[in-house]
Image (cartoon, rainbow, N blue to C red):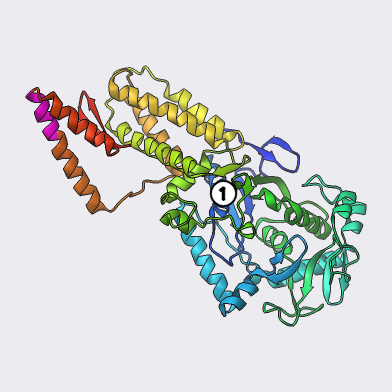
Amino acid sequence: MGNQLFIYNTLSRKKEEFKPLVEGKVGLYVCGPTVYSDSHLGHARPNITFDLLFRYLTFLGYKVRYVRNITDVGHLENESEESGEDKIGKKARLEQLEPMEVVQKYMNSFVHNMENLNVLPPSIEPRASGHIIEQQQMVQEILDNGFAYESKGSVYFDVEKYNQKYRYGILSGRNLDDIKTNTRELDGQSEKKNSFDFALWKKASPEHIMRWPSKWSEGFPGWHLECSVMSTKYLGEQFDIHGGGMDLTFPHHECEIAQNVACNGREAVRYWMHNNMITINGQKMARSLGNFITLKELFSGKHAMLQQAYSPMTIRFFILQAHYRSTIDFSNEALQASEKGLERLMSSLKTLGELSASDVSTVDVAALKEKCFAALSDDLNSPIAIAHLFDGVKMINSIKAGNEKISANDLTELKSFYHAIIFDVLGLKEEQTSDSGDNQVLAGAMELLISLRTEAKAHKDWATADKIRNDLNALGIELKDTKDGVEWSLK
């Protein structure tokens, strides 16, 4: 583990040197999807962000247990006020399906999308509905410790009482007085002591589909509870990293901290990591705002806001080109630029494979490697790492053109480095832009045209040679005359 990793800890609001609880091992928990609809571009960001973290930790030599949950119960429509229907229950009612049919349908869709984006599966992917007993046990322990109360069959976390001994708001930076001021009383919530108390267990209304028996009532767990339970079940009462979107910082992750402390007397998470949002015209992309584009639509190009289809690797590269803690604003222009940049990076691998070794090197491969890994070890700074990779592309092209030299050892090292960082760490992969038959036809046509152009030049028919080159250029095909012959590429 030669590269020491520093990550920004939301809890301390600064970068910290990462030191795992157990040397050589990492416990990583990330909030997964609520599976009631197809994933959109905004959902791709946390999954790609923490896939990069998972990959890089593994690359550094750590043994990582990566837990990413599936929320299939308890997530209500109005999550901040804990009102409305269960999102999955509502979808089941509207589509006349069993709730678990809805869950399975959209979980299959999510898994398929993640495979397309080359997001590695987690070590464990637990479902909230499969841990009802454990959630009830945590509710009872919090009650026994005096930080919750029962009211009309529901159980609520007593935020004010908790705040007297600990601090509620430590993660988000809020204080209870501000929360009191900004929290309004809602109809039907008179059973709470305070409007800002949150549900640990909710008594199900007669129309509520998803319900389980308990000592308090037939009901369902509060949304925040599942992550406290499943993270500590599989990673222990204390573990290394908890990740998720920054929109989950409050109240979801704040409530997780309170639940863990109220139950076990200490915080569970040592490093909190949050990715920023994807925006459209400066506004967060969200299903509730109606400004989202599903991943399926992005891959097919079938959406009014899209000028074309974008491949899964273009989407992945687009997200990696921004630091995970910065916002990304969606636009066709940005995606098209990412598409071209990705093509340039991937084509450099082909050029790299064609290089010939010299006796000595005039390039510094070791310095390039050090810069890339230094960027990734500095809070996963993927855009800086990618910028260094493009510096390396210039190096590769200079060697190909004969302007620089590279030794056999350095060439082997450069090939190994590029394959490791592009495929293993960044998680990019080669994509087939069209079917193999089309590619073969295009390659054959280009071979014929290059032959005709070469023949024209041999007969000093410069007009014909220039016309072939210019007409191909107008079609988006670029010809390059090199010392090894003519090369062509799609612009």
Q: Quadrant of the N terminus?
A: top right
Per the image, the residue denoted by label 1 is 45
In the picture shown, does residue 191 fall above or below 403? Answer: below
Q: Amino acid at mark 1?
A: Arg
SS category of the residue bearing label 1: helix
In the picture shown, does residue 75 fall above or below 359? Answer: below
Badge 1 local density, few (<14 within 10 Å), some, or many (20+)?
A: many
Of 294 and 105, the residue lying toward us? 294
Q: Main secondary structure of the magenta part?
A: helix
The spot of residue 254 in percent (x, y) is 77, 53
The spot of residue 240 in percent (x, y) is 67, 47
Q: Is residue 338 visible?
A: yes
- Residue 61 among magenta residues: no
Numbered range of the magenta stretch: 451-459
Q: Is residue 1 visible?
A: no
- Residue 458 among magenta residues: yes
Of 227 and 205, the residue lying toward us? 205
Q: Which residue is pictured at 78% across the width and 72% down the height?
A: 202
Q: Quadrant of the C terminus?
A: top left
Of 42 and 150, the residue lying toward us? 42
The part of the image, by quadrant, that contains residue 206 is: bottom right
Residue closest to the far bottom: 206
For this view, does 58 lie left or right of residue 82?
Answer: left
The part of the image, by quadrant, that contains residue 143 is: bottom right
